[in-house]
Amino acid sequence: MKKKEVNSSRIPIYRDAGFELYDALSTAEAFSKETEHSREPDKYIYSRYRNPTVVSAEEEIMKLEKCAWALLTQSGMSAIDTALSIFQLGKETRPWLFFTEIYGGTISYIESVLKSRRGLDIQYFTPENGNYNLVEFEKVISVLKPVFVYIETISNPMLIVADVEGITGIAKKYGTKVIIDNTFATPWLYKPLNEGADIVIHSATKYFSGHGNLTAGVICGNDNKIMQSAIEYRKFVGHTLSADDAYRLQTQIQSFDLRFSRQCSNATRLAAFLNDQPVINHVWFPGLKIHPSNQFAEKLFGSKGYGAMITFDFDGKDKTEKKNRRDKFIESVSEKIKLIPTLGDPHTILMPVEAVWGTKYPEPGMIRLSVGFEEYSELERTIVKALDIVKEN
């Protein structure tokens, strides 16, 4: 059958495991070129290497990040594994430095895989009073001289906003790469590559997808050598995103700006409301003046917003009362606000922090809210009703 050109404005889903190469000469050329690890190959070979639907979705993310390349993976964690593993050089590997206030899954990966299984020299840098002391940071980095420093623009779950410009400037002074997980801020609020970061990571499951129905990760950058190493590693370990998920992600990205701007707006209003409630002990949100890193949030994000995450803790005379108030609140909002251990969904969802991360965040009354883009008045009504029930008990 003669192939027809289809007048569609969308790239199709290429579900091919392998791609036709026609003859021995074109096969030899394709495999020879493959060693160059180009972002988009002249001839596709195998979908574990690269796939045209995946490459098309990567180009949409490149537009958002204003970067030279983006590589999609099967999850945020596989993006982290790819970004970090390319700097592992056997016995010659220098220390890796991580800020402590990062996603719990990343910490578990560091402890279980990087330290216990790979035996890498992992070091941590801890905040003081809700912020990172850059004078102390420079002292550490000048002695340690790590391969890279790994931070989150907005930390999970305490929402510490890092002084990315200051951190990057110090790191570059000592020849240290900068890897930033920008999932909570997204490129709508901030683009770390513009400030000299070497790699930016996203769990694309969250705001790029925004519908809670696929998992994906992405690493972005401008350095061609880093890209080539990442393509090679992703290929060998099989981290490439599927064509079907890449197609769905590409369609969902089209509404990213609209969705996330609404989520930021809702979160700003809700954080101010929660901060005035007597039954709530404390609210962590970078847009509030009481937040320790508010000054950095305003510096980095300007007037665009402060992200769509809020963490708050119930008041109480002891831990038992705080826990009871937390549980009553979760029960009272359950019809409209579901307990789902992720974030970035269309509707507001929540997660009890202590139940997930245990001793690191031992306060039982603490809840992390991922604010959705539903009508704000509906969201506030749901929470007001629940807080009234909490007060009565």
Image (spheres, grey):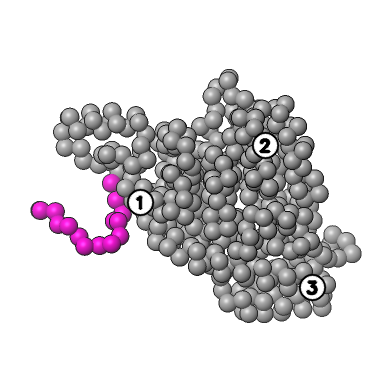
User: Dot 1, crowdedness within 10 Å: few (<14), some or many (≥20)?
Assistant: some
Q: Quadrant of the C terminus?
A: bottom right
Hey, what amino acid is under mark 3?
A: Gln
Residue 235 image offset from top left, x and y in percent: 40, 36
User: Dot 3, crowdedness within 10 Å: few (<14), some or many (≥20)?
Assistant: some
* Residue at left offset 54%, top offset 45%: 193
- The answer to whether the residues at label 1 and label 2 have Cβ atoms under 8 Å apart is no
Q: Residue furthest left?
A: 1
Q: Residue furthest right?
A: 317
Residue 49 appears in which quarter of the rendering?
Answer: top left
Q: Nearer the viewer, mark 2 or mark 3?
A: 2
Q: Which residues are magenta?
A: 1-16
Distance in Å between CA atoms under marks 2 and 3: 40 Å
Q: Is residue 329 above or below residue 176?
A: below
Looking at the image, tell me whether mark 2 or mark 3 is earlier in sequence order: 2
Hey, what amino acid is under mark 1?
A: Ser
Q: Is residue 238 above or below residue 156?
A: above
**Dot 2 corresponds to which residue?**
170
User: Dot 2, crowdedness within 10 Å: few (<14), some or many (≥20)?
Assistant: some
Residue 37 image offset from top left, x and y in percent: 37, 34
Q: Nearer the viewer, mark 1 or mark 2?
A: 2
**Dot 3 corresponds to which residue?**
277
Q: For the stretch drawn in magenta, what is the main secondary structure?
A: loop
Magenta residue check for 326: no
Label 2 element class: helix
